[in-house]
Amino acid sequence: MIQTLSTAVERVFSQGRQLLHFTRNRLAPSTIRAFLCLGAWGRSDLLAMEDLLASVKSQKRKRNEVEAEEDDEEK
């Protein structure tokens, strides 16, 4: 019996296939690339998921503040 070894490229294609489910077919290529990189970095302990979540929450707060200021200026 010949065992096949999974190469890094094969793993990336497999992860991409999982990410690109038919319900996510409208993601921009840069978004797909970002998801794949973040996942690989998280699995390799190059990125702490807690840090990523904190950063995303911070960005959402900033965006909400800017939108609120824009709404106030329009009134």
Image (cartoon, helix red, strand yellow):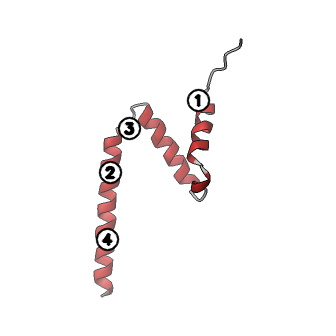
- Which residue was labeled with disc 4? 66
Label of residue 22 in the image = none
Q: Earlier in the sequence, mark 4 or mark 1?
A: 1
Q: Where is residue 74 shown, x and y percent of the image?
A: 33, 85
Q: Where is residue 68 shown, x and y percent of the image?
A: 29, 75
- As helix, strand or loop, the secondary structure at mark 3 comes to loop
Report whether 34 appears left or right of 59: right
Looking at the rendering, in which quadrant would you find the C terminus?
A: bottom left
Identify the residue at horizontal 44%, vertical 33% (top origin): 43
Q: Earlier in the sequence, mark 1 or mark 3?
A: 1
Q: Earlier in the sequence, mark 4 or mark 2?
A: 2
Query: What amino acid type should be assigned to the residue bearing mark 2?
Result: Ser
- Which residue was labeled with disc 2? 55
Q: Earlier in the sequence, mark 3 or mark 2?
A: 3
Q: How far apart are labels 3 and 4 at the CA level?
A: 28 Å
- Categorize mark 1 by other alpha carbons within 10 Å: few (<14), some (14-19), many (20+): few
- Which residue was labeled with disc 3? 47
Looking at the rendering, in which quadrant would you find the N terminus?
A: top right
The correct choice, above or below, for 68 with respect to 39 in the image is below
Q: How far apart are labels 1 and 3 at the CA level?
A: 18 Å
Q: Where is residue 17 shown, x and y percent of the image?
A: 61, 43
Query: What amino acid type should be assigned to the residue bearing mark 4?
Result: Val
Query: What amino acid type should be assigned to the residue bearing mark 3?
Result: Leu
Q: Earlier in the sequence, mark 3 or mark 4?
A: 3
- As helix, strand or loop, the secondary structure at mark 2 comes to helix
- Which residue was labeled with disc 1? 8
59 vs 26, nearest the viewer: 26
